[in-house]
Image: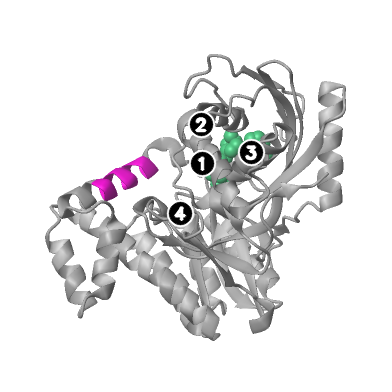
Amino acid sequence: MATIQFIDALSHKDGVEEATRLFSDTFHEDCDGVWAAPGRVNLIGEHTDYNAGLCLPIALPHRTFVALKPRSDTHVRVVSSISPAAVAVADLAGLQAEGVKGWAAYPVGVAWALRQAGFEQVSGFDAAFVSCVPLGSGLSSSAAMTCSTALALDDVYGLGYGSSDAGRVTLIDAAMKSENDMAGASTGGLDQNASLRCTPGHALLLDCRPELTALENVSQQLFDLDKYNLELLVVDTQAPHQLNDGQYAQRRATCEAAARTLGVANLRVVSDRIAKSDDPFQSLKETLDRLPDETMKKRVRHVVTEIQRVRSFVHAFAQGDIAEAGRLFNASHDSLAADYQVTVPELDIAVDVARGNGAYGARMTGGGFGGSIIALVDKGRSQEVAGLIAREFTKQDFHAPRALAAYAAASGSREA
Ligand code: ADP
Ligand code: MG
């Protein structure tokens, strides 16, 4: 069987030590502290966040660690373990949206967004990032970076939002604004909420309706894989993943246009109406009949049915109906492939191999166009299923995939 590399999570000790060392080697002084925030996998509910829908992420044990120290001026210097010799610099004074290029836009954008939100005390900083979250793999390395930065700035500038779940929503807003307006990478909030609000052993049922308050929009759902003798295998296909090449923005724009045509604020309203109707199947058909073109009908069908699948998955998993939970994984993927059209051959083939080799269900996770798949398998089978996917990838002449063992881990926190 083909071998496949499993990416281990950085331990607390190693993450703190490596980030502290990178900081002192780069800036020749000690940091003030170390903070960390996780990547995530979304169990189900894909491309629903910007449609005011439902999604269900867990935080990964894989985290981005940042060693940080505030500065007395408005300058920012950042370094990453990915390229430890290259220090990126920026100045917060007079900074405009999209005024920083390259990866530094993510951390600099968080400070900029906090200042834009009125936190004028937030000023410059030096920071060193060390991460084990694969980049651009649909596992949210970007949110791990912006959310760890937000926690650090919250602490060193004494904002006081990091210590409560409701307060963290303010940090999530800054992390989102950084991605949307500084990095120019459109994001709907799922990743940042997962990174800062998940709790160990639980999936975060996130309701993205904008009218809900922070106290109303999440609920913690038990996600205990051990209880059902299961493992959640993540396979990073290593297919090139590019969300900011316009595809994501196009999907968003189509959904917004559909909502306008249907005379509603967002597609969630439509989804709820259909779910509550006497004959949801007929109601969906009538809704789709009102839309002008085939592409829009497909996009709307995905969003409407995917929101309902999140509810069904939560129910099935809580009941211990793993066959049904797996079926919903499969239906989600198939809808993303056929109707939302965001899969690539690597994702479809990885999913097929997992399904053909005993997975209860398998689906792509994240925005798509590359990235990762998840598969629900019996305990002890992850290695074998991952190896079979790697073997098929060799046959297909794809990049070698990588794997991770996922479970519901904790949200971001101060580490040292
Ligand atoms: P994902 O969030 O799924 O990993 P994105 O395209 O949203 O994919 O974000 C990936 C980008 O985030 C990278 O291209 C890089 O700019 C930035 N990034 C994330 N983590 C790091 C890191 N540890 N070091 C440097 N840049 C990072
Ligand atoms: Mg991202």
Callout 3 crowding tier (Cα within 10 Å): few <14, some 14–19, many ≥20: many
**x and y percentages locating residue 64 in the rendered image:** 70, 44
Q: Disc number at residue 117?
A: 2
The answer to whether mark 3 is within 8 Å of ligand 1 is: no
Q: Is residue 362 visible?
A: yes
Name the disc covering residue 213, or none. 4
- State the mark number for residue 250: none
Q: Secondary structure at mark 1?
A: helix
Q: For the C terminus, which image quadrant?
A: top right
Q: Secondary structure at mark 3?
A: helix
Neighbourhood count class around disc 1 (C-alpha, 10 Å): few under 14, some 14–19, many 20 upward? some
Residue 94 percent coordinates (x, y) = 53, 14
Q: Residue at x 86, y 50 (%)?
A: 13
Is disc 2 placed on a helix, strand or loop? loop
Circle 3 residue:
150
Residues under numbered marks 1 and 2 in contact, where contact means CB atoms less than 8 Å apart: yes
Magenta stretch, residue numbers: 247-256
Please determine whether, in this image, residue 114 is positioned above or below residue 259.
Answer: above
Instruction: Answer with mark 1 or mark 2, whichever residue precedes in sequence.
Output: 2
Q: Is residue 238 visible?
A: no
Q: Whole-Å distance between the Cαs marked 2 and 4?
A: 18 Å
| Disc 1 target residue | 173
Q: Ligand 2: give its quadrant.
A: top right
Tell me which amino acid carries mark 4.
Thr
Whole-number angstrom distance, CA of label 4 to CA of label 3: 20 Å
Mark 4 secondary-structure assignment:
loop
Q: What residue is at 32 percent from the left and 62 percent from the top? A: 302
1 or 3: tag closer to the N-terminus: 3
Residue 385 in the image, given as x and y percentages of width and height: 63, 71
